[in-house]
Amino acid sequence: MTLWTPSQNEFSGEMMFVRKSMTAAFAVFTLAWTGIAFAPELSAVESSSGLIAEGPGKDLRLWYDAPAPDSNAGWVDRSIPMGNGYMGANVFGGTASERIQITENSLYDSTEGRGLRHGGLNNFAEVFLDFGHNNVSNYERELNLSEGVSHVRYQQDGVEYSREYFTSYPDKVMAIRLSASKAGTLSFTLRPTIPFLGSGKSGSVVAKDDTITLSGVMSYFNVKYEGQFKVIPAGGTMKAANTKSQGTITVSDADSAVILLAVGTNYQFDPKVFLTTENADKLSSFPHPHAKVTRYLGDAAAKSYQQLLANHQADYTKLYGRVSLDLSAAEPTICTDELIDSYPDGESSRYLEELAFQFGRYLLICSSRAGTLPPHLQGIWNVYSDPPWASQYLHDTNLQMAYAPAFCANMPELFECYLGYFNAFVPRQRLHATQYIKEFNPSQLDPGGDNGWAGPFWTNPYNVPGRSIVAGFGTGSWIAQMFWDYYDYTRDPSLLADKVYPVMYDQANFVSRFVKDVDGILLANPSSSPEQKLRNTVGTTFDQQMFYENHHNTLTAAEILGRSDSRLSTLKTQLPLLDPIQIGKSGQIKEFRQEQYYGEIGDPAHRHTSMLLGLYPGQLINDTTPAWLDAAKVSLTKRTNKSNIGWSRAERIAMWARVHDGEEAYSFYEALLGGNYLHNLFNDHRGGPLFQADANYGATAGVAEMLLQSQDHVVAPLTAMPAAWSQGSYQGLLARGNFEVSAQWTGGHASQLEVLSKSGGDLDLRYPNVAQAMIKTAEGQAVDFVAKGSDQVRIKTTKGQTYVVTDIPVCIPVIAPTNLKINKESAIDEIQLSWTGTANAASYKLYRAVGNAPDYELIASDITVTDFVYKSADLEQVDQMTIKVTAVHADGRESNQGATVIRLLDRPRRQALQYDDTDSPCRLRESEINNTR
Ligand code: FUC
């Protein structure tokens, strides 16, 4: 091992070298993977055919010409976030005094009175570097996303000063390198401080030789914390000093210096933490973090700075470098704050769209690493003693959104982080499960306690407090869905057997005991749709969809693994009885079973769109269920654009993408970037500003869904592209089945698609006219495929092979008819329909979907006029049907979309809250009616 030796003063040359060498490094890194279970054998960089070039080599970076203001407002709006899973760091870039705020996710206290500002995560350290540089010029600070490194550069008194920062996951430290262009001109005082001392938090900061130790206790959970700072100067002198409360190290007249920083607490992933009821005892058997932090720092200091940087960049680029996105944007000449302020009409707005997409990936790499606590509402960044919602984990959307980009944006191993946390808390949730089955469905109780695990709602590193009526038990199945996605995107059978299937099966076990028979269907009771006002009702679409998906995925997994566990036959019997989708009289996917017309119950513009989770992130509503897809569109349209909530906008990017409406999807990306993104690209949840990281992660996932979808195992690139992105390319997005996909398009049309098969197996690839394209291997050999119509092909792939699709004939989309109307029902069995036709339609087709049917039946085709009298004997029996018209081009191609109308037998009946008078528990009670808005 190389001992760290101070290097000479190498300011500008060194900086230039690092930036250039990283571009080359993308091509040559072939580093051993150090993760635990997931072992991708082929990364995009190692294995892509290289036929689709990476973008034009532009740097994706955030940069500013002034430091962030030294205030909470400066922290939230302008500081640069960094992180390695072990710690988060917000760098302000000051010159008189630099401020680096450090977060460690287990430094926690009481969260009594859950809500906006009630304790919880606590600011770990405020670290200052006092330079006294008050007269600076040519200032610049930046975060380079391609490198995962941040810099500050400026001139003072004719000297160029620079600082370089990175947070390393492999070496568990933050490293700061300080340089000056002239020997002997670097002087500063390092001054770490402990914020919010008093009221349950004690500690001290002591300097000795080259190290400052900051340590103390937060009494509520008896969290012992420690941070160590090692200063390694080149040249000059160094002096440690202590006052009663403050240790400092002053470096004078040095050529350069490195500061290494490691932090830790006595927190461990252990079920004991969640099973111990006495808060102060939760960590009692775990060792003080001193030895651990000393080891982290000692190990890091035994390496050279260059070695640490290389380790960090190898680790970081292994993840980050898998995906590139180029929307043909030029590198802007304006700083990032101006870029934000000029969006969406600025010259460089496409660049911001690329930057924000990659920024979400960057934040997840910083905040979700195996062995550390997962990202909470604010990721791994918190400046407060009472952060918003105590920086909890909320499992009714926020936590799941954090992990959405892990899979589609090709960083699946980041989910290992959540696995560590989940395995620690799940024994507590098993106890909860038994308690809930006893309470809600005692006849189904397994007396031996084999009742699976029940979904939590909010949790934190110390507690999973059990049921909250704010969300139904569907939260558990939603968690299990992330586990399934982890497998489905990576296709590692041992991962499925060891880490995924047991979680899904045990969740399905709980659900199978919890659901109750109501008139032959199995419903959640009690049930809530997240955060809506009607609570403790029966069979919300949220719960039913989540339960359905997990039952379904569990059965699929059992089949893959050849399992014969005892509850599987029950799951099989139950699956068709879970009745996940109900279509309402407005043509919408109902949120509540009692709802007839859209918006009768709850807030019609609610930020949560929980009835559509089967559309996204689930797979229940997909292209093989076109009637449900149309109903989802009705719900999305009616949910309106009013919500200014960041994560809600991010979710709707993805949802609109899933119904293949690129313009609507893009409009939500625009609304988010223009309305919620702060100057450092942190998402402002809803004004304040109030930082919440979920929309940062969610926007990345949403954009990925615009570029590539793979629900129902059809790999579909570029399915929701807006006109604003008429030209571009991407590399390395991940599809279900472990296919790594790249695309290049121009004039809105794909000129080339590439699919790397990382696990082998059948590839069902969909793109307009793909069946008439040229499909070859990367080596140029023609590939056999089976066409399914003109837009889909099936290729039997070989693991490790890249398939290249070129010469795709341009497809002129058939414009869908609009304004389908029921003009008259002249007889009970006769409906007169009309619609507005389109210019390139040669004829029209009419369909109907009865009741809640997922698919349409053809009523009539080859209609060459724009009206039709539909006669059918069963029209007097069918209560409700959706009628749809599509356009057909002379060449036989049908429009992707169509116009729909709902036909109700008993019309007009638009009276709110009308229910039959049976004793069904689905009937709305008086008390509920008063509490629905
Ligand atoms: C859920 C959301 C809110 C917010 C909060 C932290 O309650 O509905 O919008 O994100 O979590």
Image (cartoon, helix red, strand yellow):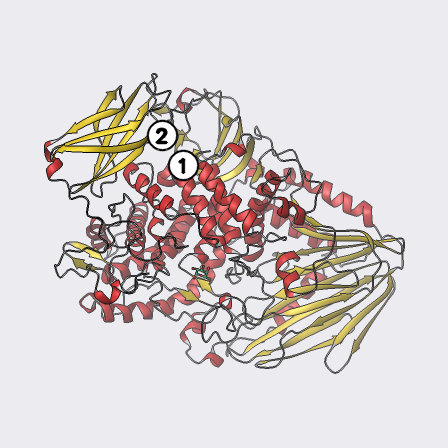
Give how far apart the Cα atoms at labels 1 and 2 are. Answer: 9 Å
Q: Position of residue 312 (x, y in %)?
A: 65, 52
Secondary element type, mark 2:
loop
Residue that numbered label 2 is attached to = 896
| Residue at image point 38% right, 49% down | 639
Label 2 CA crowd tier, 10 Å (few <14, some 14–19, many 20+): few
Q: Nearer the viewer, residue 42 or 62?
A: 62
Q: Is 639 rendered above or below residue 723?
A: below
Whichever of callouts 1 and 2 sits on the residue coming sooner in the sequence is 1
Q: Is residue 261 left or right of residue 34?
A: right
Q: Is residue 748 left or right of residue 542?
A: right
Amino acid type, mark 2: Asn
Across and down, in percent, residue 253 comes to 88, 63
Query: Dot 1, how many residues are within 10 Å of its Cα: few (below 14), some (14-19), or many (20+)?
Result: many
Give residue 840's position: percent from left, percent from top: 37, 20
Q: Which residue is mark 1?
A: 660
In percent of the image, x 69 and y 42: which residue is there? 22
Q: Are marks 1 and 2 in contact (CB under 8 Å)?
A: yes
Which quadrant, please, contains the N terminus? Answer: bottom right
Residue 410 appearing in the image: no
**Tag 1 secondary structure:** loop
Residue in the picture at 34% in, 22% down: 893
Question: Label 1 amino acid?
Answer: His
Q: Residue at x 38, y 35 (%)?
A: 714
